[in-house]
């Protein structure tokens, strides 16, 4: 069987050590903060603690996608080494990076006609996107072919659930994502928005929950309702957080006590610098395999 390399974007929000250990190359987005551009390299150029501390101090970072030239430079050495590529891309509902990857794929197919390059739009983000990459890595290691792995993730990508809440609405107000009035009311009444990702890969508000303990219980309740096998869920579960590890650990403990058949402990990761540029600190996100996010026709 011709070897293939599984690749993704840095916005899968898993640790660098994870990608290195599982031999998954990743291409980096970029972010600019306080007038300086950095690579979204999983906390190497700027530790996550510093990044979120700067936001709390008032910085408003901006982000830039992976363009076609960067994808060409990323893919070319892999193909030149004689490998085919399965690239799972960051959600097209949040970024134009998928389109950039497609343009690079088309150009490289002409340059390497004997190589296979398959690009799949994950319609996912952060460690939900990362959990999809992890599943593909397990399939690759079990001997699943490139074509079969690509077909499987294309069929099942809308089964990856992304649920998240924020305990700090300051960055949402600064960025104009909520009105000053909504910020004041939400802060006074301890209202926390509970959101998820829809079938187009967009972040969508679903509920307004009063109180942190209640929103934590509600996010786990959504997993009870939607997880594959409900309370018998036996696959992996990932959580990501933006500078609120204690809250993430509380949700992880609730998940582990509610779902006794989990495949290992809940993996807690940091929301990276690109996704975190839009959420700010205080976000906890829960990811699991479940029923389809596709809207009924």
Image (tube, rainbow, N blue to C red):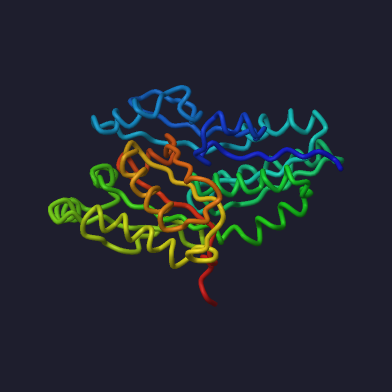
- Is 215 left, or right, of 25 in this rendering? left
> Going 39% across and 29% down the picture, which residue do you hit?
48
Q: Residue at x 67, y 45 (%)?
A: 138
Residue 259 lies left or right of residue 8; in this view the side is left
Q: Position of residue 86 (x, y in %)?
A: 71, 44
**Which quarter of the image is occupied by the C terminus?**
bottom right
Q: Nearer the viewer, residue 14 or 106?
A: 14
In-image side of 169 versus 279 (left or right): left
Give the residue drawn at x 34%, y 38%: 245
Number of marks present in the image shown: 0
Residue placed farthest to the bottom in the image? 297
Nearer-the-camera pick, 200 or 283: 283
Q: Against 194, is 58 above or below?
A: above
Residue farthest along the left direction in this orientation: 188
Where is residue 291 shown, x and y percent of the image? 53, 66
- Residue at x 74%, y 41% (from the top left corner): 85
**Direction from residue 147 to residue 224 in the image, left or right:** left
Residue 126 in sight here: no
On-image quarter of the N terminus: top right
Using the image, determine if residue 49 lies above or below residue 12: above
Whether 27 is drawn above or below 263: the answer is above
Q: Residue 183, percent across and down? A: 19, 51
Residue 242 position in % (x across, y down): 36, 39
Instruction: Confirm whether residue 218 shows in the render.
Output: yes
């Amino acid at each position: 069987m011709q070897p293939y390399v599984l690749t993704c974007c840095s916005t899968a929000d898993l640790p660098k050590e994870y990608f290195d250990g599982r031999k998954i190359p990743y291409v980096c987005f970029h972010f600019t903060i306080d007038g300086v551009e950095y690579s979204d390299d999983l906390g190497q150029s700027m530790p996550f603690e510093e990044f979120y501390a700067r936001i709390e101090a008032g910085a408003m970072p901006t982000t830039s996608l992976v363009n076609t030239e960067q994808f060409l430079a990323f893919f070319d050495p892999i193909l030149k080494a004689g490998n085919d590529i399965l690239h799972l891309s960051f959600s097209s509902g949040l970024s134009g990076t998928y389109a950039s990857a497609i343009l690079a794929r088309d150009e490289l197919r002409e340059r390497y006609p004997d190589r296979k390059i398959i690009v799949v739009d994950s319609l996912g983000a952060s460690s939900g996107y990362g959990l999809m990459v992890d599943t593909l890595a397990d399939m690759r290691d079990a001997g699943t072919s490139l074509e079969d792995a690509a077909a499987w993730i294309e069929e099942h990508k809308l089964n990856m659930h992304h649920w998240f809440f924020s305990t700090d609405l300051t960055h949402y107000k600064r960025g104009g994502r909520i009105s000053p009035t909504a910020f004041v009311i939400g802060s006074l009444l301890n209202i926390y928005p509970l959101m998820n990702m829809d079938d187009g890969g967009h972040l969508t508000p679903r509920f307004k929950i009063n109180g942190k303990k209640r929103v934590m219980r509600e996010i786990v309740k959504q997993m009870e309702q939607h997880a594959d096998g409900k309370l018998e869920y036996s696959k992996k579960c990932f959580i990501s957080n933006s500078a609120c590890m204690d809250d993430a650990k509380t949700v992880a403990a609730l998940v582990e006590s509610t779902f006794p058949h989990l495949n290992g402990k809940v993996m807690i990761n940091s929301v990276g610098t690109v996704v975190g540029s839009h959420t700010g600190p205080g976000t906890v996100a829960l990811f699991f395999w479940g029923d389809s996010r596709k809207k009924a026709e």
